[in-house]
Amino acid sequence: MKDFKIAILGCGTVGGGVARILLDLQSELAGRSSQKILLVKIIELLPKKASDRFGIPMKFFAGGKDKLSISEANRFIDEVIESDNIDLVVETIGGSNDYIEQLAIRILDAGKHLVTANKALLAERGSEIFIAAERNKRFIGFEAAVCGAIPIIKTIRESFSGDKIQSISGIMNGTSNYILSMMQNEGMEFKEALGLAQSNGFAEADPTLDINGYDAGHKLAILIKLAFGIDVSLGDIPIVGIEHIEKEDIDFGNEIDSKIKLICFAKKTNGKIYATVCPMMVKNSNFLSGVNGATNAVKVTNTYGGKHILVGAGAGSSETASSIVADIVFAAKYADIRSRITSSANLELTDAKHFDFPYIVTFETNDIPGTTGKITTCIGHQNINIDTVSHNRHKTDRATFSVATMPCTLKQIEDAIYEIKKTYPDILLSAPKIIPILY
Amino acid sequence: MKDFKIAILGCGTVGGGVARILLDLQSELAGRSSQKILLVKIIELLPKKASDRFGIPMKFFAGGKDKLSISEANRFIDEVIESDNIDLVVETIGGSNDYIEQLAIRILDAGKHLVTANKALLAERGSEIFIAAERNKRFIGFEAAVCGAIPIIKTIRESFSGDKIQSISGIMNGTSNYILSMMQNEGMEFKEALGLAQSNGFAEADPTLDINGYDAGHKLAILIKLAFGIDVSLGDIPIVGIEHIEKEDIDFGNEIDSKIKLICFAKKTNGKIYATVCPMMVKNSNFLSGVNGATNAVKVTNTYGGKHILVGAGAGSSETASSIVADIVFAAKYADIRSRITSSANLELTDAKHFDFPYIVTFETNDIPGTTGKITTCIGHQNINIDTVSHNRHKTDRATFSVATMPCTLKQIEDAIYEIKKTYPDILLSAPKIIPILY
């Protein structure tokens, strides 16, 4: 049995979890890959701390002392890249900058397989790295970069390879889903739920990227590349976060048999990909409405295979590490790796503004007879069919009511709002809230 | 780009679907596998009929005439096996007999990859076939054999390879789930629901294997082999079908926030695997309770990655074919195939009688004061904790009531019933119904 040798760069939450599994499951992994998968070297700025935290013997850490300077660590990284004694490098340093991008490319150019959980890097700078993997016929594993433990990457690459993907939708950020679940199920306001998420370890000290939808956007960009073969950058995808969701939006959702979820959405129609990340009113009949807490879920609709749903842990040390180790076993198992991620020149990403969703538009107005008529008339002028107009939900002098539309484009809604504002300058007391409905 | 040449044996519902996808997605499959995947030959007793049904040109069919005799077909199959011009054979003939087993082994011994949807064959005669695959370093693909379009096989083999599986549970037979869903949601009796399943094409003319749990048992046996590395035959797994489920069982499920589902269950505890297929009261908090119609769902709990759920179409021509084509692409993509399915000598299958479930036991007695006391006393003698005793659900002179127990073994329940019968020979008017509860 041949040896398959691993170096881990960065031994934090995820890297430490990977080292732990490699040591714990040594014989199982050998059975599964027909190779002896050996942890050879860990490069970490604080070896002693990581060794204590994860119970990993100090002998695995480069330098053999409690602390490394950055220049020492960089020198050890260069040694790993140049070494003939390493088959695969796990990059769990994180960050998306020139150094990390170049590091990834250097690892692949040195003939080593690369496994990473770095979603920002792949979403923002993935193409050069994917090309380097193909050029060197090396495997690039990034199962852990999208939805933690859910094997959506391998499922698309290896299990949906006999099909055509039509659409992907899902809950891909655990923090925001935890917050929305707490607002939904415990009646909390946004700030209270965010505070709870932070104190329970479901949100970072700086939760900006979770709340504003950008973390979910990174994951969707990677899935679009994989499923549809087109490169997208975050700027191409309309992204709306959950920071403006209020308890009354949740309450209104209940009234119309729906729950508000931060949804990643990409759909292929007539050679175009419509993609967006935004809060949607998910009908209770849609499975995604019942996915609560920090759990992630992805729904994929295929031409031949129909609807698929995958649910699992979206984050966590051992959960993410499990995905990384699966990538390591995969690289060890299949000697002749074809890492090619196919591109489709004939598909283009289109602004999801132009995609037909049914929408919920919530207006805040003065409570004066005639208001509904004025607003719905302007909506009608834009050729939008109205499904229902909800009752006034405020007991004060202000009226809040929602219009549920039949499928139309965001452009049509925006044009209607423009007309309302122009024709009746004082009628709207705040910017209308616009949320798509997902059946 | 190299050619990768395919022969299909049997062009019925599934084989025809495979041929269709291979022709429809030619350029996509080449992009994904870096090989030109070519349909070369189809062997089918009724070529003309299959050609018309699936729109496949007659030139692909061996013999080039409307009908083949069995001996002609066998001769063409021998030619395929001996040919240097075939890389992979798709076996969609079906059946589990000596001829089919030997055919599978001959294909692999001839150095060809094998893809099959034949669950009965693999569950009943899999070990020799798996050994042949390993001996010849050929790929054996059987994604389509378990839960149709759900990629549970590849997920276990390739995505959970960095983890340890603790348990598997799921709804793996679409016909029985369709029947139970109709009883649940439309208030139908078993026979009415079965008739509807047949007229809607969800059940075979002879639905015996779907109804009695054996089809689900075949799938569970394959998953146990894959997940835990032990060979099990159907005789080793206690299997109960849905044929005795009545409307009143469904009604009682509703009273206790549960739905009756035919559940495949396997769990590893202390070096033993407990496995069973039987109707269970699935609590509404368990995701599986909400899986309706012909849909399948599998829940896998891993040591590191936690809980995973996969949902999708359990059957259907194009759905099953999509799984087969994914296996073809996989075989084409990874030249150095390691098909080894690892065995765990230190695990043993144990009768699920000895596994602790909470149970619902339903008794039919005469409606006489004192009965509940007699029965629950006997249950207590077996050291079974009682959770609740439900009210009498009959308005006649007969009483039907259910005892919900805390976790205990089926053996304990059986012993309690034995004691009840022995002590009070006339108290039970029928055999008590025993259903595990799944939280």
Image: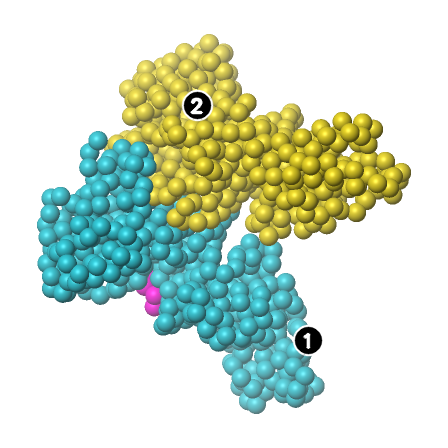
Chain colours: A cyan, B yellow
Q: Which dot marks residue A97?
A: none
Quarter of the rendering containing residue B211: top right
Which residue does the image show at 21% across and 31% down from the upper left? Answer: A1
Assign a secondary structure to mark 2.
Answer: helix
Which residue does the image show at 59% across and 47% down from the upper left? Answer: B439
Is residue B141 placed above or below A391 in the rendered structure?
above
Residue B329 position in % (x across, y down) = 35, 36
Cβ atoms under marks 2 and 1 closer than 8 Å: no
Is residue B61 placed above or below A84 in the rendered structure?
above
Q: Which residue lies furthest to the right in this view?
A: B397
Say left or right for A235 vs A434. Answer: left
Dominant SS type (magenta): loop
Say left or right for B211 vs B401. Answer: left
Residue B326 position in % (x across, y down) = 39, 37
Q: Which amino acid lies under the numbered mark 2 shown in the image of this protein?
A: Gly
Give the residues drawn in magenta, as a range. A231-235
Question: Magenta includes A159?
Answer: no
Q: Residues within 10 Å of mark 2 (few under 14, many from 20)?
A: many
**Near-viewer residue (B414 or A396):** B414
Q: Mark 1 points at which residue?
A: A391
Is residue B160 placed above or below A102 in the rendered structure?
above
Confirm whether residue B50 shows in the render. Answer: no
Is residue B426 placed above or below A393 in the rendered structure?
above
Q: Which dot marks residue B126?
A: 2
Q: Quadrant of the C terminus of chain A?
A: bottom right
Judged by depth in the image, the label closer to the viewer, 2 or 1, is 2
Which residue does the image show at 60% across and 52% down from the upper left? Answer: B285
In the rendered structure, the residue with mark 2 lies on which chain? B
